[in-house]
Image (tube, coloured by chain):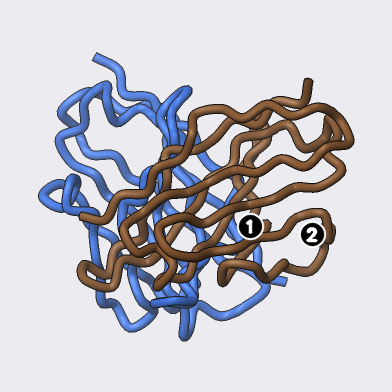
Chain colours: A blue, B brown
């Protein structure tokens, strides 16, 4: 079965760029949509954006100016970059797969990685 | 942008049925998916396509969707069902995935 694992530095300085990677194992990255979702401490889930295996992307309008999601098909990985971070970007960052359109449920999810923005 | 509204909290006695609502404009025309998130854990899909259950999810979990409200029902609730629950849809106009604000289920 497909498993997802996030990786990245747990601490990022304010105004710098946050980078996290999701490695997909047990299956191909092909034919699915690969998402980033975050959860600030004590808050709800916020969808950040997705990349289709072909490389096309869609981002949450509230983060669009600062977000880039990319894919490395040779490594079965996709990555998130969020620039100009502030304390408000401190969150657990999850990666998750969806099937697109009405089949856009998230399954599976990675375990999540906590990224703290420090001043 | 499309908005999903959930009650912040729902309380239920053990053995009873919990119902968690998710409101949205004409949500009945959309496919609604539900997630359970226990403290310190990643969310888990419990219902997709309004009422389908992934393998491994107990039959106690069911869903419905009509008009402006989707509902997740959990029967014979026990302490293990205490968690946050989120609804989610795909917004066709923006191609965005949208979450509700989440509901904390407390078993009394």
The image position of residue A110, as x and y in percent, is 58, 52
The image position of residue A8, as x and y in percent, is 44, 42
The quadrant where residue B98 appears: bottom left
Residue density around tag 2, few if under 14, some if 14–19, many if 20 or more, within 10 Å: some
Quadrant assignment for the C terminus of chain A: top left
**Relative to the observer, which residue lies in front, A107 or A6?**
A107
Q: Which residue is mark 1?
A: B45
Quadrant assignment for the N terminus of chain A: bottom right
As drawn, which residue projects farthest toward the top?
Answer: A119
**Relative to the observer, which residue lies in front, B73 or A28?**
B73
Q: Which residue is mark 2?
A: B57
Instruction: Using the image, name the chain to which the residue with label 2 belongs.
Output: B
Instruction: Using the image, name the chain to which the residue with label 1 belongs.
Output: B
The image position of residue A55, as x and y in percent, is 29, 77
Q: Residue at x 65, y 43 (%)?
A: B19
Q: What is the spatial separation of the Cα atoms under label 2 and label 1, in whole angstroms?
A: 9 Å
Picture layout, residue A54 above or below residue A118: below
In the drawing, what numbered circle is on residue A102? none
Marks 2/1 same chain: yes
Q: Residue at x 78, y 20 (%)?
A: B108
Q: Is residue B101 left or right of residue B86?
A: left
For the residue labelled by badge 2, is the local secondary structure a helix, a strand or a loop?
A: loop
Question: Disc count in the image?
Answer: 2
């Amino acid at each position: 079965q497909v498993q997802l694992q996030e990786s990245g530095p747990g601490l990022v300085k304010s105004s710098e760029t946050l980078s996290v990677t999701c490695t997909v194992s047990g299956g191909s990255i092909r034919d699915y949509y690969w998402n980033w979702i975050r959860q600030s401490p004590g808050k709800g889930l916020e969808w950040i954006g997705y990349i289709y295996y072909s490389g096309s992307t869609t981002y949450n309008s509230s983060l669009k100016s600062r977000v880039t999601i990319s894919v490395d098909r040779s490594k079965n990985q996709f990555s998130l970059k969020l620039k100009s971070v502030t304390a408000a970007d401190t969150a657990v960052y999850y990666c998750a797969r969806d099937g697109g359109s009405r089949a856009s449920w998230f399954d599976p999810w990675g375990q999540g990685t906590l990224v703290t923005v420090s001043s | 942008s499309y908005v999903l509204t959930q009650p912040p909290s729902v309380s239920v006695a053990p053995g009873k049925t919990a119902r968690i609502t998710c409101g949205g404009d004409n949500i009945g025309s959309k496919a609604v998916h539900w997630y359970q998130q226990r403290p310190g854990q990643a969310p888990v899909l419990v219902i997709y396509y309004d009422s389908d259950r992934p393998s491994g999810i107990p039959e106690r979990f069911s869903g419905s969707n009509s008009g402006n409200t989707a509902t997740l029902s959990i029967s014979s609730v026990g302490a293990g069902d205490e968690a946050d629950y989120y609804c989610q849809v795909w917004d066709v106009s923006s191609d965005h995935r949208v979450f509700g604000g989440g509901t904390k289920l407390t078993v009394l």
